[in-house]
Amino acid sequence: MSAYASEQYRVAIEADDVVTRVLFDAVSQRFEVDIAYVYYPSFNDILTAVESGESDFAANVTYTPQRAERFDYSSPTNIEYTYLYSYTNATLETIERVGIPKGTIYGELIKKYFPSLTQIEYSGHQQARHLIDSGQVDGVVDAINQLKPMLLAGLDAQLLNHQISIKPVSLIGTKDKFQSQLKAFEQHLHSAPVQKLLRETVNQYQFDIRQKSLRDLVVASGIDRSRPLKVKIEHAGQYATYHDNGQVTGITPDVLFSACDILMLNCKLVSRGDETWEDMYADFFAQKVDLISPFAKSELRKQFAYFSVPYYQSTAIMIKREGYKNNVYSNVSELIVERIGVVKDDFYQELLESLLPQKTLITYRNAEQQIAALLAKEIDYVIITRSSYNKILRESKTLLPLTEDKLIGEFYTSNVTIGFTKNARGKALVPLFDRAIKMLDLEKITNTHYVQPDWKAALQSEQRLARRSIAVVALGLIASILVSLYLHHQSNTDNLTRLKNRRALQRRYSKDISPHLTLVYLDVNNFKPINDTFGHEIGDQVLKHIAKQISRYWKGQSYRIGGDEFILIGSVDSVTLSYALLNLQKLQFTSQDHRITLDVSVAFGVSKPRREAMTLEDVMHQADLSMYSHKRKVTEREINVAKQQIEQELNMIQP
C-alpha cells in the first residue's frame, strides 16, 4: 500500500485538458489516492488557486524563477502541446497580431523568436474567441486543452512545438506542502509505461478531435455525400501497384483513401491496373472522374484542375542504354539531337517541352513502352522518376542494360498532389483534403513503400560485362559490391557532416533500443542567430565542426537527425559519458578563413540504461525531457554573452 493511500488531492484543471487527466489518473492508480478535479476558466486562475491552497496541484506549468517563489515544482514531466489557432491556417510568420493567454510563458517566447508581432493578452476561451472573431488578432496561441473547442468552432490549429523552443512543463504544488508527493509522483510519471500512455493518448485525442472537426466541416460544406467520388490512380513506381486479387497498394492509395476515411467520404476507385495515363488524363480533363493521382502541379494544369497540398516529392532522372554517349551531356537542355521518349500527357512531357522548345518528343502510353523502345534503340533517352526506375529494375526478370546518365543527375524535383476537377465540388473538396492529408504520418507511409536501388541487378550487370575473363569477373564483383556498399552508405549518411542520418537511425532501431544502451540528444543553442547573422555557409561549418568533435569524443553510434540536432547511442559507463558531454557541451569554432570565432554551446539530454527495451521514439522522448531540463539551467548571463559575442563578430567583419 502507498504511503499516500486514502489521501484526497484537489487538482486544478481547465476544461478538455486531457494531459492533466492522464497524468493524475496515473498517479491515482499507482498511489491509491483520490483525485478531485477542480475546473477553472483560465490558466491564470489555476495558478492563483494552487498558490492560495484552494487546489493542491496543477500540471503543465513552465518553470520560471518567479513562479518557483510561489510554488513547489517537480522536474519536467511532459512537453506542452501548443498551437496557433486561426481561421486562415496562419503561421507565426504570416500574421501581425497574436493573442497570448495571460500569465503564461508564451509572450516571452514569441517576443524572442518573432519580435515584430504585436501581442494582446486574454484570459480564458471566451476572450480568445472574441479577439479572433472581432479581428483584433490574426490568431491566438494556447495549449492542447483549447484544441477541441477551437477546432469544433471551425478554426485551424498549427502545432508550434517545432517552431519555437517551448520548454517542457512540470507539476506544481502549493508552496511547502507537497514536496515529498511531487518527488514520488514525478518518478512514476517518468516511467516508460506512463510516458507511452501519455504520447498515445495525446496523439489519439488530437486525431479524433481533428477528424470530428473535419467531418463537421464536410457536413456544413453541403457536399453530396451520397454520391461517390470517382478516383483514378496511375499504376506507377511506388505510387501504386495493382495486384491480381484486386488490391491496390502504394503511397498514393494509402494517402488518398486515408484522407477519404477521415472525411467520411465515399471514394470509389474506377481505374484499372492496365489503364494508361493518357486515358486517365483524358477522363479527368473531361470531368468524368473527380480525383486523380499522382498528379504534379503545373501552370498548364491550373486551367482545368485544383490541387491538394503535396504528399510526396519525386525526382526526375534521364535513363539511357549502357555505354551510350558517356559523359557527353551535363544538362537536359543539351539533348537537342537525342531522341527522347515521354509518357503522353504526363507532367514530364510538359516539363521537357519547356526545357527543349521546338524539339519533337516521342510519346508512349506508359513507362513499360518507354523502356521497351529504349531497349529497341527507337529512342536514346527516357525521362522517369528515380523510384519508378528502381522498381522497373527490381521487377524485371532479365538484366536490363540501362543506366542513369549520372552527369545530368537528378535535374528536377516535383511536388506530387491529388488533382480535383475544376468545378464547385472540387473547389469545396480541396481545403478538406488538405487538412486531412496534414493529419497523416506521410513519412511513415512513404517509408513503407520506399523502393531501394536495385544493387543486386547492378551486381549481375557487372558480372555480365566482365564474363570474358575470370579475373575481370572477380574485379567486377568486387567493384559491384563496393558500389552497392557505397550506395547503401550514401542513403544512410548525412551529406553535410558524414555522420549517419535519421533514416539510418530508424532502420537500426526499428524495433526497439536495448536496455543497456545510453541515448544522448544534442541540440545546438542559439543556432538560428548564427545562420541569420553569418549566413548558412558558416552555419554549415559549425555543424561540421560539431560532428568532428562528436566523432572524437563519442565512440558509439552518432547520427544527425535534423538541422542542429544529433543523437548519440552507445554502451558507456558514467565516467565515459561525463567526459564526452564535458567536451561537447561547449566548443570553440573558427571559420575556414579564420575571420570568425564563436563559442558554441550545445544542450544535451540523456536517457540512461533502462530496465527493459523501449521504442526509439519513447527513448528519444525521455532524452528530450532531460535536454529541456538541462536547458532550463542555462543562465541568462550565458545567453547574453553569446549574443554579445555574435554582435562583436558582426561588427568586426562589417566594412
Image (cartoon, grey):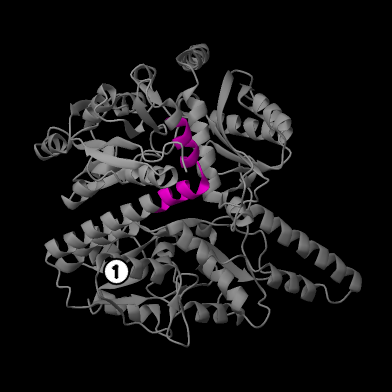
Question: Which one is nearer the viewer's eye here, 196 or 338?
Answer: 196
Q: Position of residue 217 (x, y in %)?
A: 17, 59
Secondary structure found at label 1 = helix
Residue 491 pos. (x, y %) = 62, 55
Question: Residue 279 vs residue 474: left or right?
Answer: left
| Residue that sits furthest to the left in the current view | 134
Per the rendered image, the range of residues in magenta is 182-200
Q: Is residue 491 above or below residue 285?
A: above
What secondary structure characterizes most of the magenta part?
helix
Residue at horizontal 52 percent and vertical 80 percent from the top: 368
Determine if residue 574 is in view. yes
Q: Amino acid at mark 1?
A: Cys
- Which residue occupies 33% across, 32% down? 57
Q: Report x, y in % for residue 581.
A: 65, 28
Q: Which residue is mark 1?
A: 260
| Residue 175 as seen in the image, left or right of residue 401 | left
617 in relation to 302, above or below: above
Report which quarter residue 91 is drawn in.
Answer: top left
At 18% from the left and 63% from the top, the residue drawn is 218
Above or below residue 280? Residue 38 is above
